[in-house]
Image: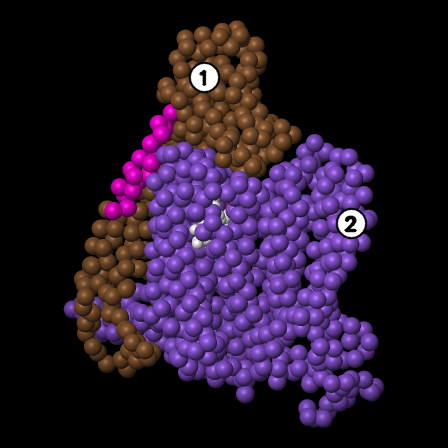
Amino acid sequence: MTETAVVHQTHDVPQPKQHGKPGGILRHTSIITGTVLGVVAAVITYAIGSHFFVPWGTQNSDASQVGLNALIAATYFAWVIFFMIGIGAFAGPIRWALGHDLTHDDAEYMAGKGQGKWRYWKYTTDHKVVGTQYLIVSMVLLGLGGLLAMLIRTELGITWMEVFDPNFYNSLIGTHGIVMIIALIIVVTGPFGNFILPIMIGARDMAFPRLNALSFWLLFAAIPPLASNLFLGGIRDGWTVYQPLASQAPIGMIGYQVTIIVFAFSTGVASVNLITTSVTMRARGMTWNRVPIFVIGVIASSVMGLVWFPMFQYSQILALSDKVISTSFYNPIMGGSVWLYENLFWLLGHPEVYVVVIPGTAALMELMVVFLRKPLFSYKVAIAGFAGVVGISSIVWVHHMYMTGWAPSAGYPFMLSTELISIPFGFLVLVMLGTLWRGKPWTRLPMMCVYAVVWDKVVGGITGVYLSDVPVDQYMHGSMFVVAHFHYMLMGAGLFAAIGATAYWFPKMTGRMLDERLGSIGFWVAFFGFQLTFGSMFVAGLQGMPRRVLQFDNAFNISNWLSTIGAFTIGIGMLVFLYAVITSWRGGKPAAANPWGGKTLEWQTETPVPLENFPVLPVVTSDPYGYGVPDPYDTVPATDKQPAGVA
Amino acid sequence: MSIDNPPTIEVDQPEEPTNRPAADHRLKEWLSRGYVRRIIVLSIIIGVVIVPLAWVVIHFMNLSGAPASAIMVEIERTMFVFTVVSAPLMAITLAILFYSLTGWGRVTGEDPPMQESPAIRTNGTAVVLWIAATSILAGFLVIWGLVELATITSYANGSTPANQQPNGQKAIDINVTAQQWVWTFEYPDQSAITTDLLVVPINVPLYFNVTSKDVVHDFWVVELGIKIDANPGAITNTGVTPDKLGTFNIRCAELCGLHHAYMQTKIKVVTQAEFDSWVREMGGKRTV
Ligand code: HEM
Ligand SMILES: [Cu+2]
Ligand SMILES: [Cu+2]
């Protein structure tokens, strides 16, 4: 035996040598150093670049914008890269390269030990910090998107004049769309996948704590390029930014492309982390049959993100390249293809809706058992449902392209696959209905979200069945009907589920109870406003109103007025809910460790959750669904007079 | 609403599967439970509310004069049939949802309820029935959709769905060119007259060759139920036979930039005689 491996008692394993104070350079980095470095680098890049790139552009007579595009892209990338450097994202790899391994003290410093609130502004690896950061950022994005939605509805409600310049209106739509899409992708897996999931499976942290910080700060760095587009001409082409319209767009479009490219890295990193954590870090005894269903939902969603997000990223890399080096991937005059873009886009674009809906649904399944004091109905069917949706969702994207003329016969197979996905989707409905069956709900806000979401899914589901049919889509495609349908899925089923999850895990994450009365008022006002907004939008669509228009026939006036009234109702409701969140977070009633009486592991540790989650790692002996009393009907002796029940 | 009071019996011995009573007995017993009956009634009520929605939906689609072609008739038929066939499952889902709000009792208050609900882990019968029902429904929708797609495709090609044969009438070719933000229509067989207001004869098949000069647009003839993207660098095709006189809407259904909202025009469906005189007026001669 050589000297490379020696058996030691655990306590006297030789530790790597501590270089300087724990944390090293990370003691000095934070969002401030990141921002300063990022902004300085962006300014320098812009200054140097405008001497270099812009003349390059003007020599190219076909595309005088090319130089300017390249300049903006370079500036944005400089911001992202130097922001990440400035906040200390690369400190780890550099230390390894220098041969300085991390010590235990370093790791604890990086997890935020002893830094108080300041750790939320740093490159902190603790999954609970990352989860909280995600929660805040998704609320900020939802607020921004919601504000833009109010502006859109203002324009559409004032039917007798143009309120906004059409270009500005178009960028409102595009920015609202992509901001909301990003917000909804992160709104469940970000906060709860990071904060709750590791505790739920009995782990001390995520599998890759530093990647966890990386995924959050990449997301953070991606936001300024997106937000700044409104000052650079805007994203005027909808969130789908179809080509070649997007190649005519002003430089604001570069912000979209850079954001997607960076955000895709962020989701990729986050997905790998969540999957690896769930697969390898579960507590002893937590076999696959004992894994909480929320974990399964997060895995399902992460798998889809991991597989399909690169398509979206790639579509934007090609688009950016068309803009900054005059390639012609999407330029038909130069042999490019708009249909190539559309395919690449929808390869993610469709699975994306399930990336949004599945973790929210899984969170609701997780919480409804607690409020019903009943086991989850048919755990196996739920898993089969998730698996089926993940599988089939990868072969349905062409239903967004039925009317492109690209492949007229493709309508047949893709209509088939699209209709089939309603079968596994139906499994999930069955699981929720079966769990409700004969339960006595404890009607707190998280439970009420279950009712709201199932209703929205029924409406979204049936209208989705219409749209998956090619002949019907031939009428509906590109109309307000589609807009109403996907809001039922994204907002009605996705966002409202996220609200339920927030209300449920709020006590664990913040140590305080969410104000039930205010929170419920806000939620229900938003819910009924939502039905009005999008219910009347269905009518506008049926009457033949195209989407993404700011003026329309008088025939559509009434439904648009109602829709705008509904939208402001949503706005009020959401503000009330937000107020409830903020006030409860700051001064709400302190929460007990297990206020709902849940059986999953996150409720078994104390609140606030200690740095390493559990003093002693738990051992799991059953699944977390051991609620309920024996079914009285089942215990009736089987005689002819009193037969046993079937359900 | 009251909570059903099942007979209370000692829980010690799990029941022996061998003495399970016959299936019809179990079904009878199940149907005799109060909550089952109430949910069935509720489902029927909800179903009765949903089915008329099918007419409401069609009503809204028809407000501006649709259906003006056999294709639009098929589209509306499909909407109608889909609403009706999915009504039972929707009704059952919503009935259970609403019933469970209070029907089995509910708990309010600050503290986790002590009272537990029945520990139903799964139920083979329910799972099998549900999967069977949703699969049959999905299967029906798929088959209906495939047949309808074939049908409207042959209508679009000016042929009769039954035998896929051209019905003998020569179609009028119309070249549709989109550009930001106008539509131009050219009649190659009518001395290539061009117009931005589509005029067509009733009951004659039209065949559109659609393209774009700049970005992607979408040629949507609303009341006739046809829609196809106008792509730069490619020609896409669609067709329809208008069967109703009147003026209908053509709208762009793909965001195409600044004035997308205003990129609309009309299609006038007129008699053959009126069409002929319109062609002459436009300086073309009828070559067919
Ligand atoms: C306050 C609630 C909301 C209102 C009133 C609202 C309203 C609208 C309106 C009027 C449009 C433009 C439709 C058109 O002309 O094509 C739109 C587009 C869109 N909305 Fe919302 N929305 C709301 C919330 C959300 C949420 C929560 C999401 C989350 C996913 C979302 C995602 C989108 C997307 C993806 C688009 C498409 C943008 C595009 O056409 O490119 N919206 N919304
Ligand atoms: Cu899709
Ligand atoms: Cu357009």
Task: Report whether A15 appears left or right of B144.
Answer: right
| Front one among A146 and B91 | A146
How many numbered markers are drawn? 2
| Front one among A627 and A258 | A258
Which image quadrant for residue B147? top left
Q: Marks 2/1: CA distance? A: 56 Å
- Tell me the kind of residue under disc 2: Ser
Q: Main secondary structure of the magenta part?
A: helix
Task: Identify the secondary structure beneath mark 2.
Answer: helix
Label pair 2/1, CB-CB below 8 angstroms? no
Q: Which mark is residue A50?
A: 2
Q: Give the x, y percent position of residue A232.
A: 64, 48
Magenta run includes residue B246: no
**Which residue is denoted by mark 1 in the rendering?**
B200
Give the extent of the magenta segment: B49-68
| Front one among A231 and A24 | A231
Q: Give the x, y percent position of residue A570.
A: 39, 56
Q: Which chain is brown?
A: B
Confirm if mark 2 falls within 8 A of ligand 1.
no
Colour displayed for chain A in the image of the structure: purple
- Tell me the kind of residue under disc 1: Val
Image vertical order of residue B151 relative to residue B112, above or below: above
Q: Please say which color scheme the image uses.
A: by chain
Q: Give the x, y percent position of residue B223.
A: 40, 28
